[in-house]
Image (spheres, helix red, strand yellow):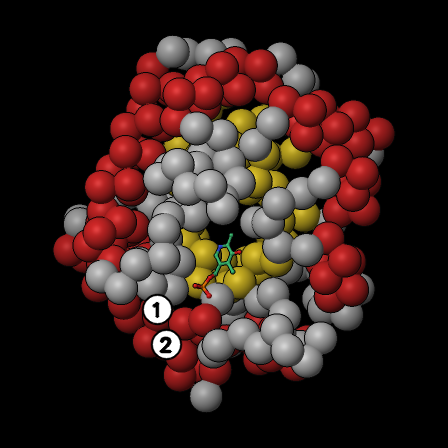
Amino acid sequence: MLKQNLENVESAIQAACARSSRARTDVTLIAVSKTKPIEMLREIYDAGVRDFGENKVQEICDKYDKLPSDIRWHMIGHLQRNKVKYIIDKVCMIHSVDSYRLAEEINIQAKKHQLVMPVLLEINIAGEQTKFGVSKADALLLAEEVSHLDSIRVKGLMAVAPYVEDPEENRKYFQEIRQLAVDIQRKNIDNIDIHALSIGMTGDYAVAIEEGATMVRVGTGIFGERDYSKK
Ligand SMILES: *Cc1c(COP(=O)(O)O)cnc(C)c1O
C-alpha cells in the first residue's frame, strides 16, 4: 500500500516537473516519517527513498540506529538549542533555522564534530502567529549574520505554507519565497548560496514544484494520516 502511495506521489512530481520544464533530478522528495513506525520507513526505504524528514530530535535519534546508514535525515521541525548536540552528526541538513542564537549553537556543535552543517532559513511566509520562522523582512539580516559562522552553510529557504483546501491559494506564497531567495542571492553574501527551496507538503507539493521547489516534504501522501492519540 505504501509503495502505491509512493508511486502516486512520484507520478505527480514527474507531471509537475514536466509542466514547468524542470528536470526530475532538480527536486528531492523527502518522505516525512514523523510518528510512523520503523517498519513503514523500511518499506519506503526498500522502494528506493533515501531522504527522510523528522521534526523531533528524540525521534531522529531513535530511528537513526535502527535503519540503514545511507539514509539522509532532514531535521524539518522547530529545534531547541539545547538539543542540537544530539542530532548534529546524524542529519544531512537542518531546514528550520529561524534565529541567530540557534545558528550559533549549530555552529559550535558542528565545529566540535569537524563538520560543516548545511542549513535552510525558515521563513514564516504568510506571517501566521502559530508558525515558526523569521519574517520576510528579517530574512536578509539573518542570512548576513549566519554567513559569518564558518561551520554552517546557508543553502536556501524553507517555509510551511498555510493549510488550505485549494493548493492554488499557496501559489503566491511560493512565488514570494522564491523571489526572496533571488533577492538574498543577489546580495552576493560570502558563504551563502541560496539555491534550495524546501516548500510544498502533501496538499500543495505540485504547485510548489511549479514555483521552483527543490525539496518537497511529503508525509501524509506517502505514509497516510498521522495518529497522535496513541503516543
Ligand atoms: C509534518 C510536516 C510535513 C509533512 O506534512 P504532510 O501534510 O503530512 O505532507 C512537512 N513539513 C513539516 C515541517 C512538517 O512538520
Q: Position of residue 26 (x, y in %)?
A: 35, 47
Helix, strand or loop for disc 2: helix
Residue at 84% across, 29% down: 112
- Distance from Cα at disc 1 to Cα at disc 2: 5 Å
Q: Nearer the viewer, residue 6 or 224?
A: 224
Side of 146 where 83 appears, left or right: right
Q: Which residue is mark 1?
A: 10
Whether the residue under disc 1 has CB within 8 Å of ligand 1: no
Q: Which mark is residue 171?
A: none
Asked if the residue at tag 2 contacts the one at tag 1, i.e. Cβ–Cβ closer than 8 Å, the answer is yes
Q: Residue at x 47, y 12 (%)?
A: 189
The amino acid type, in three-letter code, at marker 2 is: Glu
Residue at left 76%, top 40%? 84
Q: Work out whether residue 80 can be spotted.
A: yes
In the image, taking residue 224 as reference, residue 102 lies left or right, namely: right
Residue 29 can be seen in this image: no
Q: Which mark is residue 7?
A: 2
Dot 2, crowdedness within 10 Å: few (<14), some or many (≥20)?
A: some
Q: Does dot 1 land on a helix, a strand or a loop?
A: helix
